[in-house]
Image (cartoon, grey):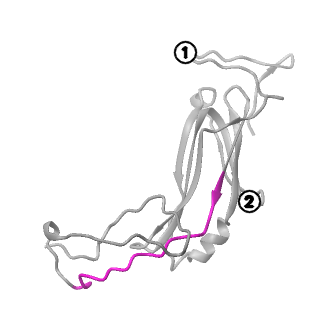
Amino acid sequence: MRRRTLLFGLPVPLTIPGVQLGTAGVGARPVEFSDARLKVEINATDGDAGLQIFLDGEAWNEVELVDPVGNAVLDVDVTGRAEDFGLTELFSESSEPPFEEFPLEQFKELFPEGTYRFRGSIVDGTPVTASATLTHNFPDGPTIVSPAADTRVRPDRVVVERAPVTTPAGIDIAGQIDNFPHLPRL
């Protein structure tokens, strides 16, 4: 919980050269973050998954992310010199333990599908909100058909071709990185 210093019931203003701060806070209409996204990164090579969180907007000093049933996933309170200056962007990624230690089904339980809500306040106290939908509609992993896993390949002679991933139906891939560590290098 953020603490504010009060003097006769009014917030004490803080002056930072070049920064306009106010005391909008209580009763102010919420503003929206300009961008808020959640995505799951599944690494087929390493056999793990991670949750990625991205947030962008006006200078904020506190934000909480709650899952579809209202449980806190993340709570960030900016403290120190940046508290009244604020942050405008946040990118974070969860740890990625291997599926042998933390199976994908457990990951799905920890981060259930649905609408997640971001809520917090910008530096003048105005509430700020956003929502992002998380789905478990993951694309099928790639199938390497050639060369065989024990084949030696010259890196300057490799041509990678792949068909678009279309299963399961309705999948929308936000990004894909091809990495083929199983190919021995000469």
On residue 70, the disc is none
Residue 147: % across, % down: 23, 82
In this rendered view, identify the residue nearer to me: 177 or 15.
177
Determine whether, in the image, residue 181 is placed left or right of residue 93.
left
Question: In which quadrant will I find the N terminus?
Answer: top right
Compared to residue 94, the image places residue 87 above or below, namely above
Compared to residue 108, the image places residue 88 above or below, namely above
Residue denoted by label 1:
18
Residue denoted by label 2:
68
**Tag 2, which secondary structure?**
loop
**Tag 1, which secondary structure?**
loop
Residue 10: % across, % down: 82, 18
Residue 128 part of the magenta-drawn span: no
Residue 110: % across, % down: 66, 67
Tell me the distance, in whole angstroms, between the alpha carbons under discs 2 and 1.
Answer: 39 Å
The disc, 2 or 1, on the residue closer to the chain's N-terminal end is 1
Residue 145 part of the magenta-drawn span: yes
Bounds of the magenta span?
A: 132-150
In this rendered view, identify the residue nearer to me: 150 or 175.
175
Question: In the rendered structure, which amino acid carries the disc numbered 2?
Answer: Pro
Mark 2 is surrounded, within 10 Å at the Cα level, by few (under 14), some (14 to 19) or many (20 or more) other residues, namely some
The quadrant holding residue 183 is bottom left
Residue at image position (14%, 66%) is 156
Residue at image position (62%, 37%) is 78
